[in-house]
Amino acid sequence: MQIEYLIIGQGISGTFLSYYLNKENKEFLVVDNNTNNSPSKIAAGIINPVTGRRLVTVWMVDEILPFAWKAYQEIGHDLDITAISQKSIIDFFPNPFMRESFLQKIETGDKYVHSYPEQNHFNSFFDYELGCGEIRPVYTAHLETLLPAWREQLLKENNLLEENFEIEQLKIEPGKIQYKNITAEKIIFCDGTSSFENSFFRQLPFAPNKGEALVARIPGLPDNHIYKKGMMIVPMAEKGFFWIGASYIWDFENAEPTLMFRENTEQLLKQWLKIPFEIFEHRSGLRPATLERRPFVGFHPLYTNIGILNGMGTKGCSLAPFFAKQLTDHLLYEEPISADASIDRFKKILTR
Ligand SMILES: Cc1cc2nc3c(=O)[nH]c(=O)nc-3n(C[C@H](O)[C@H](O)[C@H](O)COP(=O)(O)OP(=O)(O)OC[C@H]3O[C@@H](n4cnc5c(N)ncnc54)[C@H](O)[C@@H]3O)c2cc1C
């Protein structure tokens, strides 16, 4: 089989990269092993303009947020699914410090952080003595709908190989790569934490981060907001179901769910929610995060037919569409990749 591009991984990165290459009528094949705890399969899909306790505006927000909204709308339209929804976060202040921080941010005229005039509006659902504010616009990407829909499309067009990619079988030759019976011009790794072991890219400063979340049914809770008080309660595509999480753990033994997370989260929910809930699922996985919290995008300085789209960390839902498009435009039209994301910044390390 002769193709132009071999893509490893169909998480959110491989999905958008293959989507854009498909739009350009390129010949490609995606290899994906369908791991059930890949971060793209367990994420909430939140696309949030601010981050952290001090509500700092996220990196490249003015470019990346509108791009993400348009990209998910477009792929959703092509697949006849709802791939993204617009929400707002109702931020219930967990302590006086966070309340103060929020109010100070409003005073600066921040365009995403707002007061919430009807302070008693959520009284029948939640306990919150210190009041609440609102963050908007915020989006939720429906990866649970999008990933299988795009997978089906790939299968229909014979663009997907459902198997484990074995790097030992990869042969690099001048101007091409060979993998089993597949010859391609280039190979691009969108394989999340698997790239951490990849001999071409393992020198990159990856820093895996473990995240756990629960899925619960909460009958009667309105689904037009995301609710936050230390943790987030996020409406899912299936009515009545909510994603609750997540943890951010740098030091961990394995990617397995822990009893401690489940018990702590249930306890917090009991203190916060006034209505009944029922836990259905406990999810856990590793985010492909990086030490300097910026993605890895581009081609290896020595093996120029080997590329990477990875390192999306905690923000893959917003970063992946944007950088998949940049990588596509770089490949086809020699457009530059943002300096902060391009792996050219690690040229020295990668050529050692
Ligand atoms: C609990 C949790 C909550 C999160 N919530 C959010 C959120 O709300 N918003 C947000 O923006 N981000 C969130 N994230 C982060 C986000 O999920 C990631 O940034 C993103 O999913 C990374 O996508 P990816 O496609 O780069 O990698 P992955 O999702 O890891 O995809 C890699 C793909 O490659 C496949 N693969 C790997 N190795 C091989 C191999 N050898 N052969 C074949 N296939 C292979 C895997 O099966 C997988 O399909 C969350 C993460 C976690 C863990």
Image (cartoon, rainbow, N blue to C red):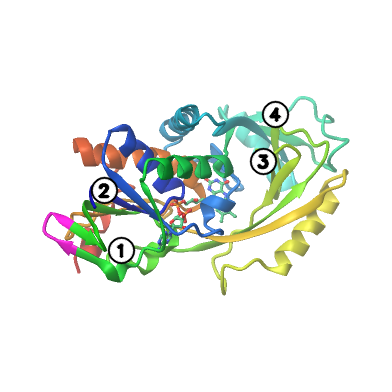
- In this rendering, the answer to whether 352 lies above or below 267 is below
Answer with mark 3 or mark 4, whichever residue precedes in sequence: 4
- Looking at numbered disc 3 in the image, what kind of residue is underneath it? Met
Answer with mark 3 or mark 2, whichever residue precedes in sequence: 2
**Residue wearing tag 2:** 5
List the single residue furthest toward the top. 117
Residue 66 placed where, x, y %? Answer: 46, 29
- Looking at numbered disc 4 in the image, what kind of residue is underneath it? Ser
Residue at 51% across, 44% down: 147
- Residue 236 numbered mark, or none: 3
- Looking at numbered disc 1 in the image, what kind of residue is underneath it? Phe
Tell me, yes or no, whether the highlighted magenta stretch contains residue 191: no
- What kind of element bears circle 1? loop
Left or right of 116? Residue 107 is: left
Answer with mark 3 or mark 1, whichever residue precedes in sequence: 1
**Residue wearing tag 1:** 201
**Residue wearing tag 4:** 115
- What kind of element bears circle 4? strand
